[in-house]
Image: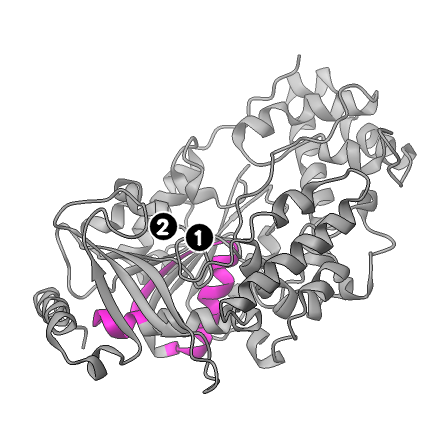
Amino acid sequence: MAISNQVRKALIALGAVLTLTAPAWSQAALPRFEPVAEGAAFPIEVSGPRYQRGYLIVTQSDNPEDGLELRLPVIHIRAAEPRPELAPVLFLPGGPGVGGLSAAQYPGAYPWSVERDFVILGRRGTQYAEPSLRCEAIGPALASTKPGAQARLETALQECRSALEAQGVRPEAYHSAASASDIDALRQVLGFEQWSLFALSYGTRLALTYARDYPERVQSMVLDSPLPHSARFDDAYPANLEQALRRVAQMCAAQAECDAAFPDLEARFFAAVEAAPRACEADQVCQRTLVNSVPLGSAADLARAPLLMDQATRMEGATSQSYGVSDFDWGVRLSVWCSEALPYAQRRNGPLPDSFAGIDSATFTPATCESWAVPPRPASEVAITTSDAPTLILAGELDALTPPAWGYDAARTLSRSRVIVLPGGFHTESTQWDGDGCAMSLAVRFFSSPDEMIADTSLAPCIEARAESAFITR
């Protein structure tokens, strides 16, 4: 039976008193939760009686010689109109290497927070955790294409790792199974019997890890843009991107105005890619340049995509889109990816010779992972999750990072699941804040009545109402 909201509040209050009054030996017990006052610690501006901020304290690893304690930031938003039978929702953002605490500043964007507690945990090693594996110098070094970039990257990797190890950090202790253990530790110290999980991108892999390792602790899941354990991102990304671009050209061909403006777009664009040099030298326009000149991350990108594809066929404006250096916590990202993703991919043996447009891995090369030097995680930790927890899987039709096919792959071993593909949708469609809100409305409805939504196979009204994309033709 789930703990009632009133009892839970009393337990949390009692825990805060015990933290202040218990003897030192009791305070050292792990895991534990340490509340912090408003304005203290991590700089996320939230206030009011519904908010509790604090740190989850856990050990870095099970190694008895590893005495390092981790302080993981937590923001707990209490439900405005609680329904005790509904488990709190835990937010699992993407990455790996993203903390996601900023979500607490906008609880209205997550409507389930009216009737459910909403909890955000800054994962181990992320920005406001202590210690943090932020390693900011690695991002610019990875993005650099200037002469000597590889040497600068090697230096950044070595300097970051040395600095972390001097603090007692063991990079091999930062992986999905460890984060799943942290999630269950947080459940225990907050007094919850179960979680409902709202997960994005890599966060869906973590959600599936938790559901596999702690099956009784999951009430329901919403997985937006799933990255199941069966997926091999480093092998599949080039082909997934090709498929998304072909779909855009087909969507254009199906609309009279777009087809008239850009006739035979699919054939012309891919012929241009094939004709361009495969290797990029200096400022030369090559296959990768043409492909990367067509971003697909939002509705605005989609509107311009046929025009950019047409321009690329004439080598006009064919420069790769630049989004700057990603704001990842690079040490975490390296530790996770180099221990549990790349070791199980064909890409671990080197570049894929036949990849679309000569596109290489969008994460880390084998050489970079070799420099970071974390051992592969056991095969049991990347085993496919089998679960009967009610699960909604959301996928964007044009998502080249986690395509809809991966949603269907995940659903095969989730006995009470439903896959919904968002027409014209992109990566993490539920947080496309400038969109129509369809994906988020589906997530909210599912958390309220999962079995009803799984049984109802009709199209949701918001999907039926989605208009065809309005393409820019000049």
The label shown at residue 58 is: none
- Residue 106, above or below 2: above
Front residue of this view, candidates 349 and 246: 349
Dot 1 or dot 2: first in sequence order is 2
Assign a secondary structure to mark 2: helix
- Residue type at mark 2 is Leu
- Residue type at mark 1 is Gln
Front residue of this view, candidates 357 and 164: 164
The location of residue 121, given as percent across then percent down, is 35, 59
The C terminus, quarter of image: top right
Pointer 2 local density, CA inside 10 Å: few below 14, some 14–19, many at least 20 = many
Assign a secondary structure to mark 1: loop
Taking the spot 14% from the left edge, 46% from the top edge, the residue there is 48
The quarter holding residue 304 reads top right
Taking the spot 49% from the left edge, 73% from the top edge, the residue there is 177
**Residue 212 within the segment the image draws in magenta:** yes
- Residue 199, above or below 299: below
Q: Are marks 1 and 2 in contact (CB under 8 Å)?
A: yes
Front residue of this view, candidates 315 and 386: 315
Give the side of residue 121 with respect to residue 427, left or right: left
> What residue does disc 2 label?
101
First to last magenta residue range: 186-215
Residue 415 seen: no
The quarter holding residue 269 reads top right
- Residue 473, above or below 70: above
Disc 1 and disc 2: Cα gap in Å?
9 Å
Q: Nearer the viewer, mark 1 or mark 2?
A: 1
**Residue 395 within the segment the image draws in magenta:** no
> What residue does disc 1 label?
127
Residue at the far front: name it: 166
Taking the spot 72% from the left edge, 63% from the top edge, the residue there is 371
